[in-house]
Image: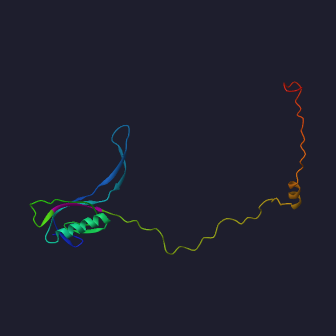
Amino acid sequence: MAKIDGYYILVESEEPNYEVDITDQPVEKGINLTDHVKRRARTISLSGYIVGEDASRIRTYLLDAQDNGKIVQYQGRNTFKGLLGGFSTKHDYKTADGFPFTLKLVEIRFAESSYVDTLPPPVKSQAAPVVNAGRKQTKNAKKSKKTSKKKDSKTVQKVTFKKGSPWAE
């Protein structure tokens, strides 16, 4: 007998799956160059029977765990901790007090925070202090008053052109 979160189930077969992604690059002659291997999430497929007086309660628990993303612990020939990736049942006349099932468990990984509680004291800046900032323009109050008073006279300037120019008169 195997268990999922303490619920007994009869498992006929367990099929663990260990896959990786292999990236390769094509070359002109010969086989492709393989440059990277990345492990995929491990999975396990189970098939068997859920029987007994608690069969409907176990089915409801597994469906709720799948719908809500609850992490379940499986203990059988293999032990596995993960999420239910698929769950199917078959209800026919052959099993009176339960049903056959297949389910797939998928491994999960949690991200960890890189935050550290005790950070070092602030580091003093390595920049040299500013000694000479250059010349600064000062604001003169008298000039600002003069610029505000503008003459309203409109003068027209005559434009002169060089001799030989097509616009010269």
**Magenta stretch encompasses residue 87:** no
Decide whether the magenta segment is chiefly helix, strand or loop.
Answer: strand
Residue 114's x, y, as percent? 46, 68
Instruction: Specify the segment rendered in magenta.
Output: 100-106
How many marks the image carries: the answer is 0
Q: Quadrant of residue 4?
A: bottom left
Q: Is residue 84 left or right of residue 92?
A: right
Residue 7's x, y, as percent? 20, 71
The quadrant of the image that shows the N terminus is bottom left
Residue 93's x, y, as percent? 9, 60
- Foreground residue among 12 and 86: 86
Q: How is the model colour-coded?
A: rainbow
Q: Quadrant of residue 104?
A: bottom left
Residue 161's x, y, as percent? 88, 30
Q: What residue is rendered at 33% in x and 39% in y? A: 30
- Whether residue 145 is visible, yes or no, is yes
Q: Is residue 23 left or right of residue 60?
A: right
Q: Is residue 102 left or right of residue 82?
A: left
The quadrant of the image that shows the C terminus is top right
- Foreground residue among 22 and 137: 137
- Whether residue 81 is visible, yes or no, is no
- Foreground residue among 89 and 133: 89
**Magenta stretch encompasses residue 105:** yes
